[in-house]
Amino acid sequence: MKKPNIFYSYKKARKVVITCETWEHLQAAKRYINLFMEVYGEVNYKDGKLETNNVVAELYDKLTALVFLKKHELKTKSYER
């Protein structure tokens, strides 16, 4: 099965994170970006570790940073209420 375009998938994952409005949405977004890594990362069966190239690692890092920022945005919104 052919993998979808990595940049299309990145944009989709980014949109999923940005549109989060609740903690439940954010948890689902985390699972979504972990799935992104599983799809584009390469599994090293000798060690059982997930290995990836620099592009995938950088995109994944950007997504996790976005989740971090969104988490703090949701936290400040909940304090304002």
Image (spheres, rainbow, N blue to C red):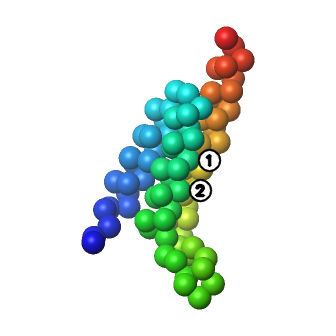
- SS at mark 2? helix
- SS at mark 1? helix
Query: Neighbour class for label 2 at 10 Å: few (<14), some, many (≥20)?
Result: few
Q: CA distance from mark 1 to mark 2?
A: 6 Å
The residue lying at 62 percent from left, 47 percent from top is 65
In this orientation, does residue 55 appear?
A: no
Q: Give the number of the disc on residue 61.
A: 2
Q: Residue 42: percent from the left, percent from the top?
A: 49, 76
Image quadrant of residue 66? top right
Residue furthest out toward the left = 1
3 over 64 or under it: above or below: below
Q: Give the number of the disc on residue 65.
A: 1
Q: Which quarter of the image is occupied by the C terminus? A: top right
Query: Label 2 near label 1: C-beta < 8 Å?
Result: yes
User: Type of residue at label 2?
Assistant: Asp
Q: Which quarter of the image is occupied by the N terminus? A: bottom left
Q: Give the number of the disc on residue 56.
A: none
